[in-house]
Every structure is written in structure tokens, then in C-alpha cells.
Image (cartoon, rainbow, N blue to C red):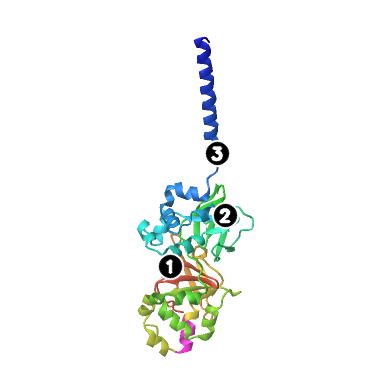
Amino acid sequence: MRPISHILRTVLVCCLLAGLFISCNKDKEEATPKSASDLIQEDPSFTLLRAAVLRANFADALKAANLTIFAPNDDAFKAAGYADVASINALPAATVEQILKYHVFNGIVKSDAPQLSTNTPVQSIGGGTAYITKTTSGSAAGLTINGARVTKADQEVSNGIVHTIDRVLLPTATTIMSALQSDPANFSLVVAAINRIPTLAVQLSTSATTQPVTIFVPDNAAFAAAGSPLTNLAAINAATLTTLSSILGYHATLGTLFSNQLTAGQLTSLNPTAAKLTVVITNNVPTIKGNQNTTAATIKRADIVANNGIIHVVSQVLKP
């Protein structure tokens, strides 16, 4: 019979080896990088994004290789009008899927990528184009996409990179005109006015123009408050083309300007006399003032991306 001490030593060695094996396996499991899907599932700031992923059955898409994901946090969803999980579940699943696809890009894009500059175009997996801007100095230093700020950059996961952003990105509209026509409750009057000016209607309806425009669009409430000749459809149809051209051209400027790229100073409009718009920045928030406006117009909805420019919805008709 073996001595008790020998048996105890054998049992102790076996326990130590078993513990070492379990510990190694645990370390190996902990060292395995998380996928983007895992990160979104576990991060407490992504509860509404998780709900959107579940609603669109999108988890597997977030496990594909070599992805860059711009992930809106809960505050971003709430700012977009989605206060809770129920509001996300009220959307059609196909709509949620299209929104999520616009936040995902093939290839790795880190914040220090040398190819990034101002409005660098990138194509989402849904086909829409977004614009990334890298600012290297000043209070605006960092990364933005379609004007949304990256609040936490370069979170490495096993299948790519995740950047947390402060706004939900909306899929690209085909053209400025189609975006306005799709929302008659807010833009029927400006659409009617634009259609009175054939050259402007063509410009805003032309896809992928080499001369994109940024347009400050008054909604129907702003048109009604502006008085003659914009109060209603009949007044617009009775207005002279010269008057409409002057007013509408004054709301547009050449180039792609997201709201965070508006700086204090003046913009040259497409008004026939090239009248200037004045940008005022207060507490980092831009407002737009026309020459004959007594107060500046606020931007009610910013950074609506079309393939021929950018729309900012403003609270007033701007007067040259």
C-alpha cells in the first residue's frame, strides 16, 4: 500500500495541473478580441443601438470582417427623436436596416488615417456616400462624419474599428429636390417656389453634380410667417420670377458645408446679385442671418445629405 503522503502529493499535483489548465483556458478566452457586435451588445451606452440591431436582425452583419462602424450612442438616438426601445420598434424593420447600413463601411478607417481631410467621401455598405472630416487643431479637433462628432474613436474589435458618434446618420437622399419632395408636410411651399424657376429646379434635381450646393431651406411654417409673396401656394404662383429667383438663390451657396463647418462671417449666395449671408456662432451653435432679417434664423434640422449637396432646414425665410 502506498503511503498516505504519496497519495496526497499525487492529488495535489493533479489539482494544480487542473487549475493551471483552467486558468490558461480562461486567459485564452479573455484574450480573444470581441467583435463589433459583441461590443455593441455589452456597452451600456448602446442600449438603443442594440434595440435597432435586434429590430433589423443586423447582428450577423456586424460580425463581417474589416468593418468600420460609426455607432450612435443613446444620446444620439434620443436627439433624433427615438427616446426608447418602443420608438425604435415602431419603425419598419427595413427602415431600421437602411439606417444601420449607412453607419457601416467596408475597410478600416482609423482617426489618424492619412487619407482623411475635409469631406473625404466614403461609401457605406448600403450604397450611400458619407463624408468624413479630420480636423487637426483648435476646439473642433477630431473626427466628424456628416457633421456628427466622434466622441470615442478607434475602439479596436476583432473585425475592425468602432467609433462612437453623437448623432444618428440618415441615409443619403438621391437629390436635394427629391428629399424636399418626399416631405410635403414641411416643404410643399419651397418645392412649389423652386419649380417656378426651371434652371434652379434642374440644378437641385441633378444627381452627382460637380458643383454641389449647400441650401438653407425654410419649412412651410417659415414660408407662411414670411408674408407676401410666399404665404401660400397661390401667392407663390402669382409672384414674379425675378422676385422668386432673388429669394431662393439667396438661400444657397456653392460647396458642401456641414453645420460644424459653418464659421462666423459671410457666405456668397447664388442670388443674382451674389448677396451675402451672415453666419453667427453663439456657444458653438451657428445661425444664419439675411441682410433684411431683424434676427438670425436657427437651424432646425442640420446636415441632410443628398448626392448633390447638403440641406439645412432653417426657421425663417432669408431676405437679401
| Location of residue 67 (image quadrant) | bottom right
Task: Name which residue type carries label 2.
Answer: Leu
Task: Name which residue type carries label 1.
Answer: Arg
Task: Name which residue type carries label 3.
Answer: Ala
Instruction: Give the residue pinned by disc 3.
Output: 31
Tally of numbered tags: 3
Question: Which secondary structure, mark 3?
Answer: helix
Question: Which secondary structure, mark 2?
Answer: strand
Instruction: Give the residue pinned by disc 2.
Output: 67
Q: Residue 88 in the image: x percent, y percent?
A: 39, 60
Q: Give the main secondary structure of the magenta stretch.
A: helix
Mark 2 vs 3, N-terminal side: 3
Q: Which residues are magenta?
A: 240-247
- Quick one: 130 or 294, which is closer to the camera? 130
Q: Is 139 left, or right, of 117 in this rendering?
A: left
**Spatial CA span between label 3 and label 1:** 44 Å
Q: Is residue 214 magenta?
A: no
| Location of residue 222 (image quadrant) | bottom left
Q: Residue 248 in the image: x percent, y percent?
A: 47, 80
Residue 44 visible in the picture:
yes
Q: Is 268 left, or right, of 282 in this rendering?
A: right
Label placed on residue 301: 1
Q: Residue 74 in the image: x percent, y percent?
A: 41, 54
Question: Which secondary structure, mark 1?
Answer: strand
- Quick one: 157 or 249, which is closer to the camera? 157
Q: Nearer the viewer, mark 3 or mark 1?
A: 3
Q: Residue at point 54% right, 84% down?
A: 199
Q: Residue 138 in the image: x percent, y percent?
A: 54, 55
